[in-house]
Image (cartoon, rainbow, N blue to C red):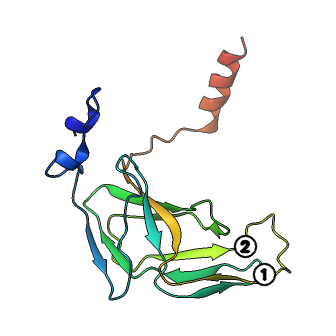
Amino acid sequence: MGALQSKEPVDVSDLSDPMDLALDVAVERGAVAPRFETPSASEFSIFSNEEATLVGNNWVPVRTGLRFSMPFMLTMIVRGTGCEWEVRIQVVDYDSSDELVVHLRHPAHWDTTTNPVRVFAGTRVATGLILPIARPAFSLCETSAFDEYDDAQSV
């Protein structure tokens, strides 16, 4: 990461491997591989591997043809792209081996009686962001501890 954290501009095309880690992704035949839209993007694009039609306000599952194999303690957040549909935010844990299926629907502010929206295979439908995670132990306390804290803050 050192070269990419430099304060001096860095031409990433000159680096042999500008990425922080390699992530195994199984790509089904005909599916579009995930890709970064710009050299400095932290989120990557995820594409539909099938056609779908958004009707009404129902969530529609859309297959991507992608299976992500992430190292221990990484997770992926899948969210919207700002396109003409809403994406159900989801978390893909490091132990998942299922195909990524993105759920789409008309945006909540749309009149859902309007014409259906068609999503074609190869269309950018979502973005993914890989994040490190921590699995904390929880220190449980009784609510009286919160009451004492609140009382101390109000003085």
**Residue shown at 66%/78% (left/top)?**
59
Query: Residue 89 location in percent, x, y?
Result: 57, 63
Location of mark 1 (residue): 56
Location of mark 2 (residue): 106
Picture quadrant of residue 74? bottom left
Picture quadrant of residue 145? top right
Q: 96 and 81: which one is in front?
A: 81
Query: Residue 17 location in percent, x, y?
Result: 17, 52
Question: Where 130 sits versus 5, above or below?
Answer: below
Task: Tell me if label 1 and label 2 are in contact, CB under 8 Å.
Answer: yes
Quadrant of image for the C terminus: top right
Picture quadrant of residue 51? bottom right
**Disc 2 residue type?**
His
Q: 36 and 61: which one is in front?
A: 36
Numbered disc 1: secondary structure:
loop
Query: Residue 2 location in percent, x, y?
Result: 20, 35
